[in-house]
Amino acid sequence: MIKSSRIISLISYCFIILAGQMIGLPFICWILFTIFDFGNIDQIFAILAVIGFGLNFTKWKTNIKTTILSFFLMLAPIISRVSQVPTRMFNYLSFEIPLAIFLVGYLTFVILNAKHKKNYS
């Protein structure tokens, strides 16, 4: 259950759609493109997201502090985008549903991971 909640939340994180003028762009593509957009404040948040995403594949992925840090690092670019653009621009289901799945799934992963560590300590 712990592993599946993490995997589901990471997949939904990748498929959060940011609406553009012509087409929607998956969030993971926005992050990868923004990393190389030098001189832009969003580059910092994209790097934080990649670090947070990468922490899920390290040997510390089950450490409680690492999972919480990873959650906030991955949440940083979403908060940045929502604060830069009017919130009415994010009122569509292909943004709201994957975001909700990510939030619920990753928070479930953190809680289950903490309970698991507590029981085996």
Image (spheres, grey):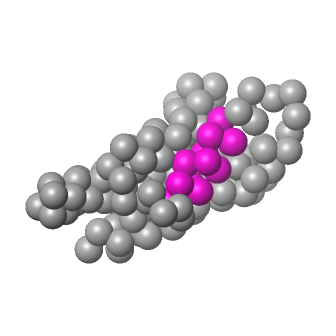
- Measuring 72% from the left and 57% from the top, which residue is drawn there? 29
Residue 70 on the magenta segment = no
Rendering coords of residue 20 (x, y %): 72, 47
- 33 lies left or right of 82: right
| Magenta portion: prevailing SS class | helix
Residue at 11%, 61% in the rendered image? 119
Q: Residue at x 53, y 64 (%)?
A: 57
How many marks are shown on the rendered structure?
0
Q: Which residues are magenta?
A: 45-56
82 left or right of 68 in image: right
Quarter of the image with the N terminus is: bottom left
Give the image quarter of residue 2.
Answer: bottom left
**Residue 118 position in % (x across, y down):** 15, 55
60 in relation to 71, above or below? below
Instruction: Identify which residue, 21 or 121, lies in the foreground.
Output: 121
Indicate the quadrant containing the C terminus: top left, top right, bottom left or bottom right: bottom left
Toward the front, the furthest residue is: 121
